[in-house]
Amino acid sequence: MTAIRFNVGDPVQVKRADPPGHRRTPHYIRGKRGVIERICGTFPNPEELAYGFSGEPKRVLYRVRFLQRDVWPDYQGPQHDWLEMEIYEHWLEPVKP
Amino acid sequence: MNKGPHDMGGEEGGPIDTADHGMKFWEKQANALRLTLTRNRAVRLDELRRAAEDLGPRYYELEYFQRTTEALRQVLLEKGFFTERELAQKMAEVRKRYDGH
Amino acid sequence: MSHEHHHDRTPATGPDFDSGPPSEHEIMSRAMQELLEARGVISAEEVRRRMEQFDEDYPYRGARVIAHAWSDSAFKQRLLADGKAACAEFGIDLEADRLIAVENTPQVHNVIVCTLCSCYPRALLGMPPTWYKSENYRKRVVREPRAVLKEFGTVLPENVTLRVHDSNADMRYVVVPMRPAGTEGWSEEALVKIITRDSLVGVTVPKA
């Protein structure tokens, strides 16, 4: 099983990658910085399942919390609004706090 | 950029039609068909999503259940549940049944 | 007396059929279903049972769970800790769905979307409304959520934090709205009546 690399509260950055094919990491969040909100568990990789492969070994899925102002430079709402989503481990990189 | 038509979060959009327009009978049946197939593991939800994403510009021309139907068709063909010809024949038969009334 | 057979059609589709000629996609969907049934991959009965679940069962579950959470604070804590287990305890099997329940408070309001497709906790809430699946909702609610909520008639004070959840992978979400004032002492049956589906997605709030 894959090791869990991040703990709740760790700052992380979403990879700035642009691979073809089925991905569950929306373009708008790539390259953005957030913090680990929780560890959801391990799941088969959807990027492989989408093409008929087993998706094994399972990957760790994290929930990541972002400040809206860190996602959209022109965000219109209050500075304390959040955006949260699930990101697979291989899309996350550590950040020095 | 490899951004698919489905990957639309953050793009400019218009006003939202906040009413729920429900589902037609065939859409309810199509939805039930899709769920039955994923629960039975005949197809995976991830495969259906991928096939919908691969629709390209047609993604925006189709309504939700039209997209899911075309995606399902694609995956079932890939997996050899039927051939294009068999599907076309069955569709002609179904069409006749509706018309020939 | 009854005109129900006046516009009758081939009984290929069942009790409530759609008016007008079938679209290509309807024909395609029916044809695929019949081919699969003929090959024994699925049965007509399985599909029919699923349709019934969506009509008669799933849409009514969410409000019952939330009404129970409002009435039993220990249950609410269990729901927030593990949505699927709490539902199971309450007699609701969410099947393949994993559930995260997010709570509205005086300081925090939650709203749910799936920008990439239309993931939704179907086994808890039934089918998503057409607006949830629409391009404009999927595009805009992650970026300008307060403007979107206004279109639904919901205005949040500036001091309330808005959490938008993009349901983009394996979890599904339900909002636990705040219980409105004026409902003290209400039975769960009475509470269920004011818990709208839209409030469980977070675009509106329940009103007593």
Image (spheres, helix red, strand yellow):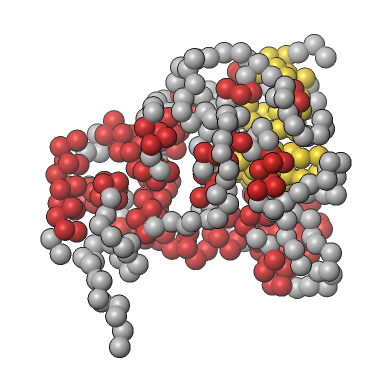
Q: Residue B64, position in %: x, y? A: 43, 43
In this view, the residue farthest toward the top is A96
Q: How many marks?
A: 0
Which of the 4 image quadrants contains residue C74?
bottom right
Camera-side residue of A2 and C30? C30
Q: Which residue appears at 58% of the width and 43% of the height?
A: B15
Judging depth in this view, the residue of C203 and C105 nearest the camera is C203
Q: Quadrant of the N terminus of chain C?
A: bottom left
| Above or below, C194 relative to C115 | below
- The structure residue drawn at horizontal position 69% and vertical position 72%, both measured from the top left corner, is C189
Q: Is residue B41 shown above or below A46?
A: below
Task: Estimate the x, y position of residue A27 in percent, counting from the top left.
Answer: 57, 22
Percent x, y for residue C81? 75, 45
**Residue farthest along the front direction in this orientation:** B14
* Quadrant of the rendered image containing residue A81: top right
Q: Position of residue A46 (x, y in %)?
A: 50, 28
| Viewer can see residue A66 | no
Q: Is residue B101 left or right of residue A33?
A: left
Residue in view at x 53 percent, y 33 percent: C116
The quadrant in which the C terminus of chain C is found is bottom right
A79 sits to left or right of C138: right
Is residue C107 visible in this depiction of the protein? yes
Viewer-proximal residue among B88 and B10: B10
